Image (cartoon, helix red, strand yellow):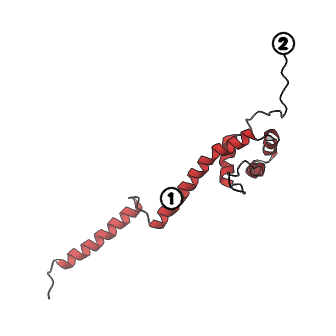
Amino acid sequence: MTTPEWLKPGIYGALVGAAVVGIVGFTWGGWVTGSTAQERAMSMSHDAVVTAMVPVCLDIARTDPDRAAKIESIRDASTYQRRDALMDAGWATPPGTEDPDRDIAQACLASLDVDVLPVVSETPEPMVDEG
């Protein structure tokens, strides 16, 4: 069996074209492998969970009866130890778990902004009846 003369350059052209399309697709086209897509999906879902848990953390902090003392301990900690202080306060522990989450603590700390919070006294001031 003899092959036509034009078949050899056609095969080479198809191989080179496929290589160029693959290179362009992966570098500029946004194509990714399955493992890269899996890593990105896991990262995005983790970020979404952390974002969803920040209001829970803030609510736990808001309703904590020992809030003022815990905020002071967080405020007194150095900047790089505040996340650990918030974790020790128990505010970054998601409901149903026993251990606090570092990423939730960091996001909660950013939303809490302990330097701006006013110092709240633990005992309410008595109301005076002026009537």
Decide: few, some or many residues near mark 2? Use Cα within 10 Å; few <14, some 14-19, many ≥20. few
Is 38 situated above or below 67?
below
Frontmost residue, 43 versus 12 = 43
Determine the image quadrant of residue 7: bottom left
Residue 63: give x, y in percent of width and height: 73, 39
- Residue 38 visible (yes or no): yes
Is 60 situated above or below 128?
below
Element type at mark 2: loop
Residue 46: give x, y in percent of width and height: 58, 55
Circle nearer the viewer, 1 or 2: 2
Decide: few, some or many residues near mark 1? Use Cα within 10 Å; few <14, some 14-19, many ≥20. few
Element type at mark 1: helix
Give the side of residue 104 with respect to residue 124, left or right.
left
Q: Residue at x 74, y 38 (%)?
A: 115
C-alpha distance separating marks 1 and 2: 62 Å
Residue 41's disc is 1
Residue 51: give x, y in percent of width and height: 59, 47
Q: Residue at x 64, y 45 (%)?
A: 54
The C terminus lies in quadrant = top right
Is 31 situated above or below 130?
below
Frontmost residue, 127 versus 73 = 127
Q: Amino acid at mark 2?
A: Glu
- Residue 114 visible (yes or no): no
Determine the image quadrant of residue 25: bottom left
Give the side of residue 55 with respect to residue 115, left or right.
left
Determine the image quadrant of residue 45: bottom right
Give the side of residue 77 with respect to residue 38, left or right.
right
**Which residue position holds label 2?**
130
